[in-house]
Structure formats: structure tokens, C-alpha cells
Image: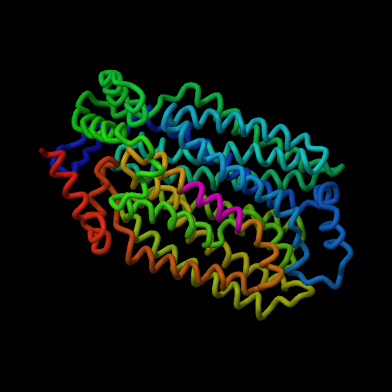
Amino acid sequence: MAEGLVVANDGEEYHGKLTCFVILACMMAAMGGVIFGYDIGISGGVTSMEPFLKKFFHDVYIKMKEDKELSNYCKFDSELLTSFTSSLYVAGLFATFVASSVTRVYGRKASILLGGANFLAGAALGGAASNIYMLIIGRVLLGVGVGFANQAVPLYLSEMAPSKYRGGFNNSFQLSVGIGVLIANLINYGTEKVKGGWGWRVSLAMAAVPASILTLGTLFLPDTPNSLIQRTDDHEKVKRLLQRVRGTDDVQAELDDIILASEISKTIKHPFKNILQRKYRPQLVMSVAIPFFQQVTGINVIAFYAPILFQTIGLGVSASLLSSVVTGAVGIVTTGLSMLIVDKVGRRGLLIFGGIQMFVTQMIVGGLMGAKLGDHGGLSKGWAFVILVLICTYVAGFGLSWGPLGWLIPSEIFPLEIRSAGQSISVSVNFLFTFLVGQTFLAMLCHFKFGIFFFFGVWVAIMTAFVYFFLPETKNLPIEKMDRVWREHWFWKRIVGENNEVIIKEEEG
């Protein structure tokens, strides 16, 4: 295993190595990302299948098949159809606030387990759905599962991983999301060809497979030392777990920092109230800005509606689903690359590079669709291929940057006393804007047409500038020492510098 050594802020050293125990535990926890990705990818695929539309969304089916006068951009504009997709995120939005308390009081493991159980129930109901109510209730249960899993899994990964490898380990959550999307696209491509029109049931029910793995596997997971110490005064028990996790007996420096963070956290009775204090202002801003920006990149438009988008430019159902497989594969490869380089290159560099790449491709796609695709007919195969390549380039930029780092950065910047509350805010903002983008995209596509790509492109330009000016670098810094980056940042030190210096003097005294 790889030996690791991290220098703490006060000169003390964290010793340890990257152990098989940590790798296996994090792989199992990251299965929550696979289910999240599967749920994102599967909805876009089944909503492009004619038997599914005919059974549950008959108006959309009629418009698609019979209304020859309808604009290419408006064929799928249906509030009920978008409600099916976005109901998952409304449920996740509310569930994450409950999950915050569960994660803090009962541990990260308990939240992951509850998430897995809800995933199982939602998959069963979706696969067996006989009417629109069963279908949407199934999506709501999946949403509750997503709320719990997305609250706990990024925290689990950040706390279990040695700080030297924290970026790579946390990025495995987004890699897992990408794998889930790709698996969903492959399954949709296969089930669309099933004779008899019941293939969509297989697509929806197959979510039970990763859900079962997560639920059963979580039973054997340890909780994180940072979480365990919040629920026990037995420091020896925490030390034994930390020694097992780090693969060394020399864990005293890290244990001392965890104990100190825990003692501070136990003085905080109302973390959602405390997070509003001036000394936590940078973390609060980032917990809102980072997930907001992640969603207004427009990526979930591609993930939710890629098959519908590709049909809009003139591809058939099967070709559209296959194109979604290609974009999903590109996302996985680039997220894997991000895992390998994030702790070397840093967070800021990847976000800025990926932002520029996404901005340029969105401008070109919008321009080409405006010039080549009218309200009726489709693109030639050559131009459709060019659009596909450009969208893959856009997905690659996201997979390298905002995809994984949109989950990594919020999970690593909060001190322990407000960590669950901060993660809850981050996840809820993510779900809120995922819901809003998902719920409004088909209507926006109908009204903005090709301008939809310019709309998201402008947001990408804004977020890239925000990162350049306001986001400090956090690579390789121990998670319980993260307050250092704000005190040294040109802007944030004006807000937190004096406040944090008082706290440090009190601790030293």
C-alpha cells in the first residue's frame, strides 16, 4: 500500500498509509453514487421509449407521432413528463434535512443504510407501476434514498480517506455517478428493443441491483472516526478504529485534532443557526454557490434528456440512446482522469480549465443548432455527428472539473461542528436547482430553442470567474485544519481573519 505523510497546520504530522480496508469501505459507500447516476440516466431513456410514453404520457406520444406542425424543440414539452423526472429531486431536497440530523446523531453509516432501503422500495414500485401515481411515488422513494445517500456518502469518503488522497477518493463519488449513468444508458439501449413494449419495466426495476449491494454492504461498513467520536467518549475505541483505517499505530496527532474538533462540535446545539455566524461565512457561501453552479452548467439537461435532445436533432430512438451511451462513457473516462490528478493539479486549476472547455463547446453547439436546425426536419448525419462530438467534449470538461469537484469541495471545507448542516445545505441547493432545471428545461427548450446553450454558457463563464477570484486551493490540507485557507485568502481574510485569530489564541491559551 502507498505510504502517506501529511503535515498538519501546527507542524504536527499525520502518519499512515492507504490501506485495503479504506479502499474497500469507500468503494462500498460510493455505490450510493452508482444508484444516483442510474436514476438520472434511466429517466431520460425510458421517457424516450414509445411504449412508456403511450402508457403514462399519452399526450406526449400523440404529439410526437402525429403533430407534424409542431416545432422540433417542443415535441416533449409536458409538465407531467418533467414531473416524473424531477419528483425525485423534490423528495431528495426535503429528505436531506432529515438526513442531516440522522448523519450527525446516528452516524454516516446509518444514513447510507436508510438511503439503500428507500432505493430498494422505489425500484420495486417503479418496475411494477400500473399507473402514473405508482410511477411517481416510486420516484419519490428513490428521491428519499438519494437525499440520504448524497448527504452521507461524500462526508464518509472525505473523512475516511487520508488527506493526501482525499480529492481522488471523494471524486470516486462522481465517478460512481457516471458509471450509474452509463449502466442506465446501456440497459435502456437494450430494453428499448424488447418485443412487447415492457422493456421500460426492466430499466426501472434494475435499480434494485445496486440498491441491494449498497444496503447489504453497508451493514459491514465501519463508521468514520470523525463521526464515531461525536457519539462516544471512548477515545480508545476511536483510536483503535483510526489505527485500523490508517494502517499504523502512530495516529495520535490526527486523533488529537479529531478530538478537538469533536469537543468544539459538542458545544454547538443548533448547527443550522451557527452556520450563519460570520466566521463560517466563506463555507456558507461555497455550500450554496458550488452546487448552484454545478447545476447551471446544464449537465443534468444532458443526463436527463440526452436521448430526447438527440431525437430533437433528428436521430432515431435507438441512435439517440446509443449516443447517450457514448456521452456517458466520455464522462466516466474524464472523471477517472480527474481522480488521478486532482490532488496534484489542485481544485482551482481543474475548475477553470473545465469551465473554459464547457463554455467554448456550448457556444459552438448553440451556434450550429441555430444555423443548421430549423423548427421542422432534422440535421444531416454529418452535422448530427459534429453536435455529438461537441457534446462529448462538453461532458469531458464537466467530468474533469465541476462534476467531481462540485461534490468534493463542499464535503471537505466545513469544520466538524457544522459539517452535517453544511453538507445538508449543499445537497439541498443541488437538489433544488436540479429540480428547477429539470422541471423547466423542456419548456425552455421549446421557447429558447438553440439559445438554451447560450443561456447555460453564460452561467459557465460566471462560475469560472467566481472560482478564479473567490475559491482558495484546498488540496492536501487535513480536513480538520481547513480553516487555514480562508484566513490566508485575499478576500475571505477580511471577513474571517480577526474572528479566527481570537479563536486560535483562546485554544492556545
Q: For residue 433: magenta?
A: yes
Image coordinates of residue 361 in percent, x first then y, are: 53, 70
Residue at left offset 62%, top offset 74%: 451
Image coordinates of residue 170 in percent, x first then y, are: 41, 43
Q: With respect to residue 13, does 242 lie above or below?
A: above
Q: With respect to residue 314, does 108 lie above or below?
A: above
- In the displayed orientation, state which residue is furthest to the right: 66
Residue in front for this viewpoint, 102 or 159 = 102
Q: Quadrant of residue 69?
A: bottom right
Q: For residue 204: magenta?
A: no
Residue at left offset 24%, top offset 26%: 248
Q: Quadrant of residue 71?
A: bottom right
Residue at left offset 41%, top offset 39%: 420
Image coordinates of residue 470 in percent, x first then y, are: 33, 63
Per the rendered image, the range of residues in magenta is 426-436
Tell me how the rendering is colored: rainbow
- The quadrant of the picture occupied by the N terminus is top left
**Left or right position of 49 against 490:** right
Residue in front for this viewpoint, 48 or 82 = 82
Image coordinates of residue 432 in percent, x first then y, are: 56, 52
Do we see residue 424 in this rendering?
yes
Do we see residue 20 in this rendering?
no
